Image (spheres, helix red, strand yellow):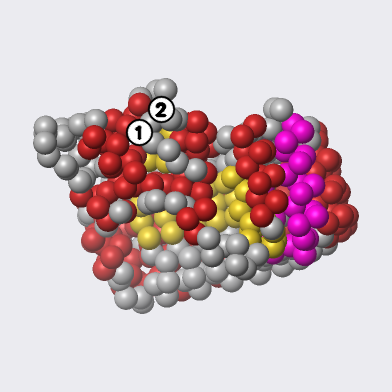
């Protein structure tokens, strides 16, 4: 009944109420007095007026970049009122699809303003409100929004917001019916075993979340087992980060069962979870049968080479394994172990195992890297009078400039044009990889059509920096 007072109305009205309505009568709390003048006002002027009414200093970066799709306002000290001014301007914004507001002391009051904005804005898709002390009341606001969500939001980062059991319970209630959220970050909170039980029940039902970050929380055995019970039957989650919790060997047993039954999970990080050789043995039983996992990170766990051998041999025994990366980089290994890994990588050429080599043997750098791989590729291109980009494109069946890391590793090891070992391939991937899990040749080769003239040795500018 208070549409008169909402500055975000689609068309102007003849008369404007002078008295501010109560929250109960208002569809949203993002009102501005004397609204009529804003129906013909641009977004910049609208934001400046909102800042004046909220008593905050305008953010010049926000004003300059209102037409960009990605808005990064991390660490700007907005506070609740500054956030409200931003929210007012975002109601009618149609260009910003990703908004980052990390560490701005938003608190629950600022979160309420953002949620009210999202009820009107159908363009914003990704929202980062990490480290904002949102707490229980903020979690309640988010939960209510998610349960009746009509926005386009699919990515939500809530890291470091002091969420405990009650907050997680509210969020899980919402996510049992909201399947629109695809990426959820709950890392660096205070989620205990009770929260693990709630998350497990939610994951047993939810068919929306594809990426979930629960690292740096307080899961122990009970919470780990409950969480894994939900993961067994989940068919949509592909990336799960559980690093820096306390799963222990019993939690590893539950995770091994997940890997045995669930072939949808592609990425699993359980670094720093107090998993020893016993836990590695239990994980290896799952790896023997798993047909989906590509990345397993076990860094900073108290296992030794015995556990590492069990994991590598489990991959060897699985002809359908898709493992591309096994990170046990704190485990000290010997030369015989590396030879065993070479044998396994011959069976699974897409695989790389990151480990720590005993001192002295690691000094034989030529064994690991040999010549600079970029120089070898450049030399081959010069000798055959072709652009370097053509060499890479010839390795990709689709002929495009991007390909998955595992496929790139496999074709690079198997090709015979440029002799190169898996350690050199690792160096190439490090230089060419994107956050999306792809290697991008065009990222390093901005001039793919540049021909190599006869008798000339052209060194592409981007490759010179790599060499």
| In this picture, residue 21 sits left or right of residue 199 | left
Residue located 33% across and 41% down the image = 377
Q: Which residue is mark 2?
A: 396
Residue 350, by quadrant, is top right
| In this picture, residue 437 sits left or right of residue 322 | left
Q: Are marks 2 and 1 in contact (CB under 8 Å)?
A: yes
**Residue 368 lies in the magenta stretch:** no
Residue located 58% across and 35% down the image = 349
Residue 115: x and y, percent? 52, 54
In the rendered image of this protein, does residue 352 appear above or below residue 44? above
Residue 64: x and y, percent? 23, 61
Q: Which residue is mark 1?
A: 392
Residue 129 visible somewhere in the drawing: yes
Residue located 47% across and 52% down the image = 369
| CA gap, disc 2 and disc 1 | 7 Å
In the rendered image of this protein, does residue 429 appear above or below residue 164? above
Could you say whether the residue bearing mark 2 is in a helix, strand or loop? loop
Residue 60, by quadrant, is bottom left
Could you say whether the residue bearing mark 1 is in a helix, strand or loop? helix
Q: Callout 2: few (<14), some (14-19), or many (20+) C-alpha neighbours within 10 Å?
A: some
Residue 434: x and y, percent? 43, 47
Quarter of the picture holding the C terminus:
bottom left
Range shown magenta: 292-318
Residue 268: x and y, percent? 67, 47
Residue 96 visible somewhere in the drawing: no
In the image shown, does 29 or 199 lie closer to the viewer?
Answer: 199
- Outermost residue on the top side: it is 397
């Amino acid at each position: 009944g208070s549409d008169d007072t909402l500055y975000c109305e689609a068309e102007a009205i003849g008369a404007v109420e002078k008295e501010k309505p109560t929250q109960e009568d208002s569809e949203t709390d993002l009102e501005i007095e004397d609204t009529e003048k804003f129906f013909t006002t641009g977004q910049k002027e609208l934001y400046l007026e909102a800042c004046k009414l909220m008593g905050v200093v305008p953010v010049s970066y926000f004003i300059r970049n209102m037409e960009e799709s990605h808005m990064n306002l991390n660490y700007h000290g907005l506070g609740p009122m500054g956030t409200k001014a931003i929210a007012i301007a975002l109601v009618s914004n149609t260009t910003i699809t990703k908004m980052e507001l990390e560490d701005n002391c938003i608190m629950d009051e600022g979160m309420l303003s953002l949620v009210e904005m999202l009820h009107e804005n159908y363009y914003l898709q990704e929202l980062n409100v990490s480290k904002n002390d949102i707490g229980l009341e903020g979690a309640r606001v988010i939960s209510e929004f998610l349960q009746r969500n009509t926005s386009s939001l699919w990515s939500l980062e809530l890291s470091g917001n002091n969420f405990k059991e009650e907050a997680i319970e509210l969020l899980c209630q919402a996510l049992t019916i909201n399947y629109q959220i695809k990426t959820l970050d709950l890392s660096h909170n205070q989620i205990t075993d009770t929260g693990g039980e709630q998350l497990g029940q939610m994951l047993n039902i939810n068919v929306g979340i594809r990426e979930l970050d629960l690292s740096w929380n307080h899961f122990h055995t009970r919470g780990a087992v409950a969480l894994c019970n939900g993961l067994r039957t989940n068919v949509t989650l592909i990336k799960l980060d559980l690093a820096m919790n306390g799963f222990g060997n019993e939690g590893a047993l539950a995770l091994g069962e997940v890997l045995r039954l669930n072939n949808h999970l592609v990425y699993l990080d359980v670094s720093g979870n107090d998993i020893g050789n016993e836990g590695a043995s239990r994980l290896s039983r799952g790896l023997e049968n798993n047909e989906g996992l590509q990345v397993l990170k076990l860094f900073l766990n108290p296992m030794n080479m015995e556990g590492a051998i069990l994991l590598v041999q489990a991959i060897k025994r699985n002809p359908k394994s898709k493992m591309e990366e096994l990170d046990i980089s704190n485990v000290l290994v010997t030369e015989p172990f590396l030879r065993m890994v070479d044998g396994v990588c011959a069976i699974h050429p897409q695989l790389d195992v990151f480990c720590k080599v005993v001192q002295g043997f690691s000094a034989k750098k030529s064994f690991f890297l040999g010549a600079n791989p970029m120089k070898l590729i450049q030399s081959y291109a010069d000798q055959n009078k072709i652009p370097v980009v053509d060499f890479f494109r010839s390795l990709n069946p689709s002929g495009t400039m991007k390909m998955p890391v595992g496929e790139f590793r496999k074709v690079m090891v198997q090709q015979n044009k440029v002799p190169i070992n898996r350690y050199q391939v690792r160096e190439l991937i490090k230089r060419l990889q994107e956050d999306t899990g792809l290697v991008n040749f065009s990222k390093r080769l901005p001039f793919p059509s540049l021909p190599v003239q006869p008798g000339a040795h052209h060194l592409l500018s981007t490759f010179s920096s790599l060499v």
